Structures are given as structure tokens and as C-alpha cells.
Image (tube, grey):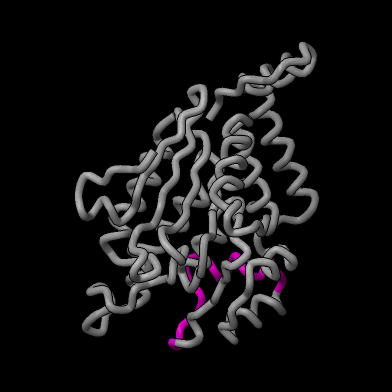
Amino acid sequence: MTPTPATARESLVLVHREDTNGRVVVTLTLNRPAALNSFTAAMHDVLLPALNAAAEDRQVRAVIITGAGRGFCAGQDLGDPTMAGGMDVGAVVEKYYRPLAQRVRSMPVPVIAAINGVAAGAGANLALCCDLVIAARSASFIQAFSKIGLVPDCGGTWLLPRLVGRARALGLAMTGDKLPAEEAQRMGMIWQCVDDADLPGAAQALAQRLAAMPSKALAETRRAIDRSMVMDFGDAITLEADKQRELGNAPDFAEGVAAFFAKRPAVFKDR
């Protein structure tokens, strides 16, 4: 099914819903292919509400973010009026990239980035904000900020060292070198690299698999892992106990146990 945009502004992000037995996967496609889907204020004004709508819709159980054409996202469009007239770049981060990154990291369902081409600058770090990143073999990641005298944003300074370690994070950020998708997978920066033709199917299959799983437990897994990164070992175990206490009293746990003993597929509904 091809999404039908209602207005020119809405067409900057295409929204597609795939409903499988009441479990909805929403695909958000950044849609400025002639500009490698680089961000403008207008695109931000559509993407964040689309993510919020997916978060609020209890039928939605997974989200895919991808790009139209030959690129995922080339980062900020430096020709956008938001960057004109000596604009405070920090204000752009605070107004647009902070809420976008924090929204992705706080979604109540898993978020998959399907990287169909170059992901540069804030586009690369938006991808890394997602829970799982699947990239086409021809895709690449570029921390392009140093080339224009800036530091990584959209969460990049937090994400990169945690994903690949300090040495590699500094190397990627300082040189701005292109990192091929296969190398990104090898160093643990992304989840999976697949043949180009297989990317849409692989992303959808993973999303459908996650959509059938207990959404609340998956979201809490993300939160627990993120929080544990700044805790000592004992505090992390305390956090695990707190999460298990909460989830152990939720319907999905009872359903999972019942399904296990009945040797049947579980039907999870919590979010």
C-alpha cells in the first residue's frame, strides 16, 4: 500500500500502517529524496508529531524509520531558513533535535532504523537513537560535524562511545570518515547489515516479530539498559528487581507463563 499524503508538508514524512491481526507496524519514511532527506524545520514539524501519534496509538507495536530514494538522511539541511542569518546552532539542537532524539529513546514500542543509503550527521545519530538498526550493504554512516566545525549532536556524543568505545567514537567524530555498513555491524554500532534488495523485507520482518512480543517489557528493557550504563553493579541489580516486580504484576507476564505451560503462542497486549 502506498501512503497518500494529505498536504505538501505532510508529504515530507510518509506514514504507512501495516496491520497484522490487530498488531500495527508504522513505517515513517523521510521524504526529501532530492536532498538526501536532509532535515528542515518543516520536516521536523511533521516527524515529531508522527512519532507522538504512534506512541499514543495503542494498536501500534513497532515503528520503522527509513528514507526515500538513495539516502536515509544527510543530516541538517544547511540551506534551510532555520540556519540562515547567524542562527544559534545550539538553539536548533534544543528546538528540534533534543525533542526528536528524546522521543525516539522514550517510545513505548521498539523503533527500528532501516538505513537505505547514506546516514550523515544528525541523520546518522537519529538512526543510532533507534533500538535496532538494519542497514543495506551499500549504506554508510558519516559523523560529518567536524567538517563544518561542530560536534556530534542528536545524541551522538552519548551514543557513539557507548556503542563502539571511546577510541572509535573519537576516530569517527574527528575524522568524519565514511563508515560502511558492514564495518558498522562488525564493530557493533548497528544490529544487522543485509543485501540492499532485502532491506525492506528484513526491516518489516523484524518489526513484525517485535510487534508480537511484549511491548512494555521491550521498552522497559531499553530503559533498564540505558540507566544501568551509569550505575554500579549492585544498583543495576536493584533496578532489575524493581523492573521485574513491576512487570511480574502485569498481564503480559501472566499470559507468557500461561502460554508456556499450554505450549501455545502468547498473545501480548501490554504497552
In the image, residue 212 above or below residue 164: above
The magenta stretch spans residue 162:
yes
- Which residue extends farthest front? 197
In the image, residue 226 above or below residue 218: below
Report the residue at 34% width, 73% height from top. Answer: 77
- Total marks shown come to 0
Q: Is residue 36 left or right of residue 271?
A: left
In the image, residue 9 above or below residue 158: above
Residue 81 in sight here: yes
Report the residue at 30% width, 66% height from top. Answer: 40
The magenta stretch spans residue 228:
no
In terms of image quadrants, where is residue 97? Answer: bottom left
Which one is in front, 68 or 262? 68
In the image, residue 84 above or below residue 227: below
Which one is in front, 145 or 19? 19
Q: Percent position (x, y) of residue 64? A: 50, 47
Q: Percent position (x, y) of residue 53? A: 36, 40
Which one is in front, 39 or 89? 39
Q: Is residue 98 left or right of residue 83?
A: right
Q: Percent position (x, y) of residue 194? A: 65, 57
Residue 93 in sight here: no
Report the residue at 60% width, 51% height from top. Answer: 198
Which one is in front, 140 or 237? 140
Q: Quadrant of the N terminus?
A: top left
In magenta, the rendered stretch is 148-165
Q: Percent position (x, y) of residue 166? A: 70, 75
Report the residue at 41% width, 48% height from top. Answer: 28
